[in-house]
Image (spheres, coloured by chain):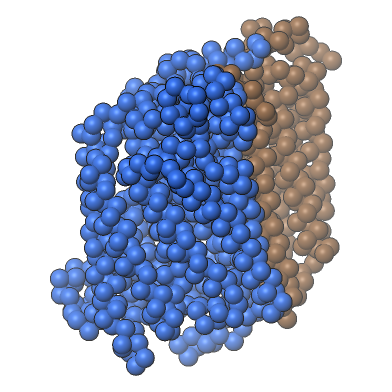
Amino acid sequence: MAHAETAAAEAHAHAGHAPQAFIWKYVFSTDHKVIGIQYYVTAMLMALIAGTLAMLIRLQLAWPEKTFPALNFLTKGYTDGVMNPEFYAMLFTMHGTIMVFFVLSTAPVSGFGNMLIPLQVGARDMAFPFLNGLSYWTFLPGCIVILSSFFVGAGAAAGGWTSYPPLSALRSAVPGSEMGQTLWIIGMVFFIASFTMGGLNFVTTILNLRTKGLSMMRMPMTMWAMFLVAVLGLLSFPALTAASLMLLFDRHFATSFFVPSGLVLSGQLVNHQGGSPLLWQHLFWFLGHPEVYILMLPALGFTSDILVAFCRKPIFGYKAMVGAMIAISGLSFVVWGHHMFVSGMSPYLGMAFAVGTMLIAVPSAVKVFNWLATLWRSRIIFTTPMLWALGVVSLFISGGLSGIWLGQTALDIHFHDTYFVVAHFHLIMAGAALFGVFGATAFWFPKMFGRMMHDGLGKWHFWFTFLAYYCTFFPMHYIGLAGHMRRIYDPYQYEFLKQFQPLNQFITISAFILGTSQILFFVNFFWSAFRGKKASENPWNAAGLEWTTPSPPPHGNWPGEIPEVHRWPFDYSVPGAEKDFVMQTDPAPIGDKAGSH
Amino acid sequence: MATPVLDAPLFAQPGNAAVAPPPSAALPEGGGGGDSTPLRFDPTRFGLWAFLGTISMLFIGFTSAYMLRRASADWSPISAPPILWLNTTLLAASSLTLELARRRLRALDLAGTARFFGATGLLGALFVTGQFLAWRALRAQGVFLATNPHSSFFYMLTGIHVLHLSGGLVWFAVIGARVRRLALAPGGDGLGLFATYWHFLGLLWAYLLFVLFVL
């Protein structure tokens, strides 16, 4: 007991000694809330850049024959108003890299993970606050390195976000393979180091620092998602670290891990032999597939927690939801081969990967079923966060269905490297993750800044984004089915693709609307952060632990003792209860059955 | 065993263990705990094990690359520089002296702790030097990084192992500066975390030797 008392005294001391100087309070902070916001804002600014790259891609695909002298200021990208083909390759490479790693892994995981974990498990801070601060200050140099690659030498990496060798391994392969690819590798190493530090903190905090009474099976779905994401990151990112190091050696120290024999480049025999480009693909996708769940799972967690709060009903099938998330995470380690069906593999191995991929449909369907069952016959309150959560459900279904097609070896050989794939992953992975982040932002904004986001502006932002998102990515299924390839600079050099120019123009206009409507978000975000309506402790009448502390929470998270938890965070509309929700910290025996999980 | 001269207030009295600060106070980076959180494990120890899991995955990644690359036609094995066996002995000895240091620490024999702990660091540094000598020996034979895939893997894997070990030596220096205070922790096992990491690197080295030259 002495132990607990000492710990309590220490925690109080900790809470009382918040750093005062601006630089320690807001810059080199070790407070999880500040670090979470730092991550989040950095990620959103990176999204702005990566989104702009996508706009340039779309401009090129819609009107490759037109000239845009106004863009000549991008000296590396445009000559006389015409985009350079090499620049196009840099655009899609860097759009993918920045979005996947520096935006959609960062904002939900590093941003909201840091923000929410101590608040939802009932801890004063993360387990290793210093390591946490260090992780952000490792992440930021990674961002700077990745962005700087546009301005160094011949430009940014251009071998695709997957950086397949030999394109990425030979410095003379394309202009972006010079310094750009090296900076890509260095930026990724920074990112992985930062993500690993974060992951160690997540796992340790969730397993070890839960408050009294908060068993694993009483955790919000978001916490389950963060826990699984951290495990996935810790176990899968090392494969990319290993591969990146070998790629660096191939590029700069003349080894032959990935570069095969007999390769002729510009009429010259390359001085490497015996390497295996397939080896990179295996290592890359061993990370790459779990990585897409690193993006997805937090969004699925946010969605469950938000749906419940605005249906005013307990979550349907909590244990099944947790089981589904664990199953999805486990399966993610054994299905990477489905990204490589056309790379050549034994048909039996291909079949094994296809079967594994099909199996993921089962836990995914469990999740959708349980969401619908949670919504079933409830009186939905259509707030902004709720709209985003419903958007995630919609995108998860639309994008998931095409995943079943792509997981089949026979079909994938036709679809591979077409816009069908682009449509699929933008809906399910990118879209669901992005919508999840927007939902979480609107929902937990009070805990970030102590204010509410503007609801009207938020709804306009949602509807513009939702409609423009579908208009942008849904037609890509059709052009993909018709054989429209990814990553081509001018599709209309091919006779059979000429008919798709009008559809591509429609997609581009939708994409521009999608991009422009994000201004609504940024205006709302920054305006609300400083001028928004002051938020009460629990503005949504939600039942979770994080709503028992002031908005924004003070240093140390709770002014007094950390509350004890007596039930799960989903006790809404409990018969016999005074209000239509029972706080997680309420010791009353009402609804004990629901809380006894 | 001569009793070392002690700074009295720095030291726990033998019967005083119950009021000694908990490990989280000795290791401030572990101090984010909740008021009444019943800690399931020591968070720092748990975090270290998770980190070791990550390092293991890194080397599993390298191993799978090694196995795949080994099957190609241009694979020509290099022979191990004999000094590796000496290095292996040094590293094993350093694990042994570390265990002896922990035993002395538990007995609150600080002079003995410092002696054995210092020996651990010295043996570790000798191991790193030995690895440099091994690379030099190979270079003298004309076996370079890019000579063949086996030599590429040899230089890369031993290099990354040395990097991890150098990180361990930095940690060694940090702990060395506060070895006396470590005796304050309950049970006096302030070297436990470091020992876990150090023994792990020893085992990792044995594994690498096995993969590179036995398998």
Residue farthest to the bottom, as pictured: A495
Residue shown at 37%/64% (left/top)?
A95
Compared with B202, B59 (above or below) is below
Q: Position of residue A418 (x, y in %)?
A: 44, 78
* Chain B, hue in figure: brown
- Nearest the viewer among A133 and B98 is A133
Q: Residue B103: x percent and y percent? A: 81, 25
Residue at 35%, 41% in the rendered image: A381
Name the side, left or right, on which A506 lies relative to A136.
left
| Quadrant of the rendering where the N terminus of chain B is positioned | top right
Letter of the blue chain? A
| Image point (76%, 6%), residue name | B15
Residue located 50% across and 63% down the image: A400
Using the image as rendered, state which of residue A407 and residue A279 is in the foreground: A407
Which residue extends farthest left? A70
Q: Position of residue A567 (x, y in %)?
A: 56, 27
Give whichever of A550, B152 is nearer the camera: A550
Q: Examine the rendered structure and indicate whether residue A52 appears above or below residue A15.
A: below
